Amino acid sequence: MALTTRSDRGNQESNSAWFPERKDPGFIQKFCCKVIKAGEIPKHVAFIMDGNRRYALKMNYSRIIGHSMGFDKLAETLEWCLDLGIKEVTVYAFSIENFKRSKKEVEDLMKLAKGKFDRLLLERDKIDKHGICIRIFGDISLLPPDVQVAVANTVKISRHNNRAFLNVCLAYTARNEMTNAMKELAIGVENQMLRPSDICEDLLEKCMYTGEATQPDLIIRTSGEVRLSDFLLWQSAYSCLTFLDVYWPEFTIWNFLWCIIRFQLSYQKIKDGKQYNNQMKEHLQHVSDKENALKEACMAGEVNTNMDDIIKRYRQEREKRVNKFINYLHNKRLEFVNALSNLD
């Protein structure tokens, strides 16, 4: 039996909209969503959209059709998130490891990605209507030049929106992200923008690709695989993890609502863990500030100065250095995107 080709499905991969005409979900779905919204709703949901290729094989489609149908499912899922009041969504679109796939599949995926980002430019009015800021997390330099331009244009047209956030992990792995963040910190210390004593968990986190994003409350992976595959390894420490035995194109609103119920059942325990971790980080930062302030005071001969004033001054100076460095990093990444974009 022959595989279904792109033309057999009306060139679906290039024509599908990010914000298609919305269908009436029906009474039962509306009612269930209303019931779910009576409980805690995750503010940030991340998706590992796995199973597109296996779904295509199951349905006797070509691989690129499976990926294209996966995009259609993402568009539908974003609608559900808007309906439920979920303000931030992160999707694992393309791993650095995916470059190891066949040359044809990678080329098809890059062509699909470019088409989807170009399509976003045509839907700018809907992006602005919903106030969606689109952010790309990953090593953009690994992408083909035309995809880099399409990505930069999308980021540029939406960067001033702040009512909702769509984070697309493209040419991304968590190990690459953490390595890159450490390199940025090393450059900061080498250029004397930072001191080694300034480096802490919070600063490392802010140097990551995801530095401006919140941590995901709920991570959903489809396809039956029970692993994170190098996705948001740092950020998922206090996330509710759910693994579904359905391929991504088969993912339904009922699967989604079940995942949210799992989140609600785990909510208090996760909240308590986060709160304890934040308290510990504040305590360790205070201890670090005290130790470093004492060292500086002794070296400067300020033995008779009030200790609280010394610590306060040191903390203010540290925060000033850190904020200046984070602004430098933000502007550096902004300039990189602006240089790629071909929009005025």
Image (tube, rainbow, N blue to C red):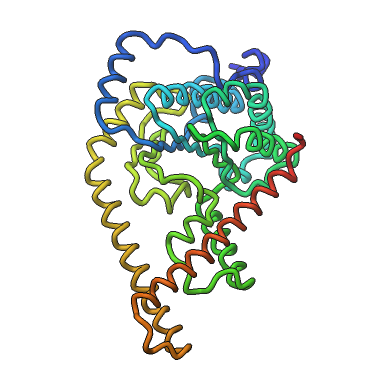
Q: Residue at x 33, y 21 (%)?
A: 254
Viewer-closest of 122 and 175 = 122
* Left or right of 273, for residue 78: right
Q: Where does the image place residue 326, in percent across and percent down from the top left?
A: 55, 58
Q: Where does the image place residue 26, in percent across and percent down from the top left?
A: 36, 8
Can you tell which quarter of the image residue 155 is in? top right
- Classify 262 as above or below 315: above
Counting the numbered discs, the total is: 0
Q: Residue at x 48, y 60 (%)?
A: 204
Q: Where does the image place residue 59, in percent across and percent down from the top left?
A: 51, 20
* Left or right of 160, for residue 231: left
Which of the image's four quarters has the N terminus? top right
Which of the image's four quarters has the C terminus? top right
Can you tell which quarter of the image residue 301 is in? bottom left
- Classify 287 as above or below 253: below
Q: Residue at x 48, y 21 (%)?
A: 76
- Classify 116 as above or below 233: above
- Classify 268 as above or below 275: above
Q: Residue at x 42, y 27 (%)?
A: 81
Q: Where does the image place residue 46, in percent across and percent down from the top left?
A: 43, 38
